[in-house]
Amino acid sequence: MLSTIILEDDLHQLQVIEEIVKNRIMINPTPHEYDMRVDLVTANPDEVVQFIQAHQAYCLITDIDLKHKLSGIDVAEIVRNNSRF
């Protein structure tokens, strides 16, 4: 199962992205079921870092310019460095 993480500091955009991803999973135009779920939706990069340390097989959708000490690029680098693939 592919665990999906959505990181966005604009709450409206966060909700829109989450809805798009969940709808895409649900309304799948292929004959094969998506082996994917949304496990974390947050505006806090620290939550993403904690999540990836405890889970594996994830897809990260992130904003780049977060109003936080970590940017989306920083979080993506942490995800890549903690990847178990």
Image: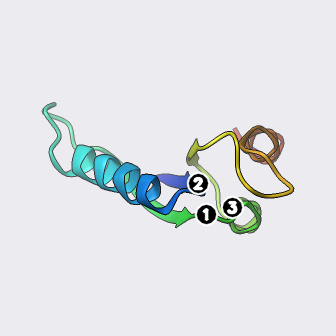
Which residue is at 25% across, 43% downward? Answer: 24
The image quarter containing residue 53 is: bottom right
Q: Earlier in the sequence, mark 2 or mark 3?
A: 2
SS assignment at label 2: strand
The mark closer to the camera, 2 or 3, is 2
What residue is shown with label 2?
Answer: 7
Q: Are discs 3 and 1 less than 8 Å apart at CB?
A: no
The disc labelled 1 sits on which kind of residue? Answer: Ala
Which residue is at 38% across, 60% downward? Answer: 15
The mark closer to the camera, 3 or 1, is 1
What residue is shown with label 3?
Answer: 48
The disc labelled 2 sits on which kind of residue? Answer: Leu
Q: Please indicate whether residue 57 sits to the left or right of residue 68 in the image.
A: left
Q: Are discs 1 and 2 less than 8 Å apart at CB?
A: yes
The disc labelled 3 sits on which kind of residue? Answer: Val
Q: Please indicate whether residue 47 sits to the left or right of residue 19 in the image.
A: right
Percent from the top left, x then y, of residue 68? 79, 58
What residue is shown with label 1?
Answer: 43
Of residues 67 and 42, the one nearer the viewer is 67
Percent from the top left, x then y, of residue 51? 68, 66
Percent from the top left, x then y, of residue 40? 53, 65
Quarter occupied by the C terminus:
top right
Separation of marks 3 and 1 at Cα, in angstroms: 9 Å
Of residues 31 and 16, the one nearer the viewer is 16
Farthest residue, direction top: 30
Q: Earlier in the sequence, mark 3 or mark 1?
A: 1
Q: Are discs 2 and 3 less than 8 Å apart at CB?
A: yes
